[in-house]
């Protein structure tokens, strides 16, 4: 019993801030440990949507950092584990936009890390869930950011593309000018269009807003001035 109480307490104490710090530092070991603690707690709270969401968020951050490594096998495993928790959270509270956003994000991470034949299966999930999040909460910067990430990876022939992604990132910044992630992704889109000078400004802004984000610093360092 004492062990169970300890597991639940550790799961409750871990917040989004702890997960973000580990993600920013690209600390996969810490994220694996945190995801395990949260999963253990959620396993005892199967009807608690918040507990399920925390697991999904932790696994999404782990998949994100694994893709940055890159380690597609770990990214895929994390995305699959996170989707199960996110699906449970959505089932418990289907009107919560953030739960749909994290499920769509995880499906998108599965697409980014899986073979094409598997990726096709999750492409619709990524699109539908993020669209649902935007529909439920159109004023959320995070929802538009996730929509943009989806468009960034989705080829124009399937309705996506970098230009559409840029509009989403710009909308995310309009809603929250302090979103370091939105500036980071806008920089990635600009660089993909060979607009390196503009991209560097966005990376610099992202680093200014969140100096701890290793991936943002890496993108700034690898982007030429022109």
Image: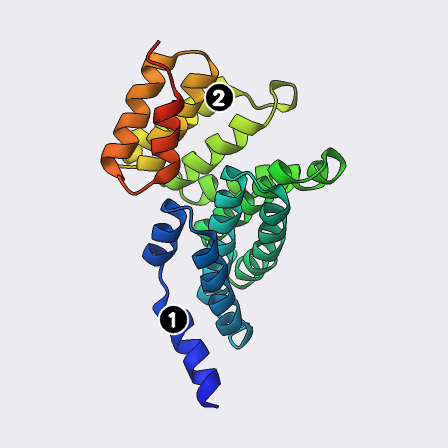
Quarter-of-image position of residue 46? bottom right
Residue at image position (60%, 36%) is 112
Q: Which mark is residue 207?
A: none
Relative image position of residue 148 (x, y in whole percent): 47, 30
Quarter-of-image position of residue 15? bottom left
| Residue 201, above or below 82 | above
Q: Quadrant of the C terminus?
A: top left
Relative image position of residue 136 (x, y in whole percent): 45, 45
Q: Secondary structure at mark 2?
A: helix
User: Which residue in the structure is indicated by mark 1?
Assistant: 12
Q: Earlier in the sequence, mark 2 or mark 1?
A: 1
| Residue 42, above or below 20 | below
> Which residue in the rendered view is the most extreme toward the top?
226
Question: Is residue 103 something that shows in the picture?
Answer: yes
> Which residue in the rendered view is the most extreme toward the right?
117
Q: CA distance from mark 2 to mark 1?
A: 38 Å
Relative image position of residue 222 (x, y in whole percent): 40, 23
> Which residue in the rendered view is the most extreme toward the bottom?
1
Residue at image position (43%, 58%) is 30
| Residue 129, above or below 149 | below
Please tell me which residue lies in front, 213 or 93.
213
Of the two numbered discs 2 and 1 in the rendering, the one whose residue sits closer to the viewer: 1
Task: Classify mark 1: residues with Cα within 10 Å, few (<14), some (14-19) or many (20+).
Answer: some
Quarter-of-image position of residue 122? top right
Residue at image position (56%, 28%) is 153
Relative image position of residue 43 (x, y in whole percent): 55, 73
Q: Which mark is residue 164?
A: 2
Q: Is residue 120 left or right of residue 167?
A: right
């Amino acid at each position: 019993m004492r062990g169970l109480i300890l597991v639940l307490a550790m799961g409750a104490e871990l917040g989004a801030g702890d997960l973000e710090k580990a993600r920013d530092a690209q600390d996969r070991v810490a994220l694996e440990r945190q995801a395990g603690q949260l999963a253990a707690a959620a396993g005892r709270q199967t009807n608690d949507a918040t507990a399920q969401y925390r697991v999904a968020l932790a696994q999404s951050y782990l998949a994100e950092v694994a893709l940055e490594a890159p380690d597609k096998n770990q990214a895929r495993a994390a995305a699959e584990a996170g989707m199960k928790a996110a699906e449970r959270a959505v089932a418990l509270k289907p009107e919560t936009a953030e739960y749909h956003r994290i499920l769509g994000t995880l499906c998108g991470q599965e697409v980014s890390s899986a073979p094409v034949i598997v990726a096709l299966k999750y492409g619709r999930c990524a699109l539908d869930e993020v669209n649902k999040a935007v529909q439920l909460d159109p004023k959320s910067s995070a929802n538009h950011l996730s929509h943009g990430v989806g468009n960034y990876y989705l080829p124009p022939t399937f309705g996506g593309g970098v230009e559409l992604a840029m509009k989403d990132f710009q909308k995310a910044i309009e809603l929250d000018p302090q979103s370091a992630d939105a500036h980071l992704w806008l920089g990635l889109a600009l660089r993909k269009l060979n607009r390196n000078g503009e991209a560097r400004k966005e990376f610099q802004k992202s680093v200014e807003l969140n100096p701890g984000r290793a991936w943002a610093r890496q993108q700034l360092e690898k982007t030429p001035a022109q």
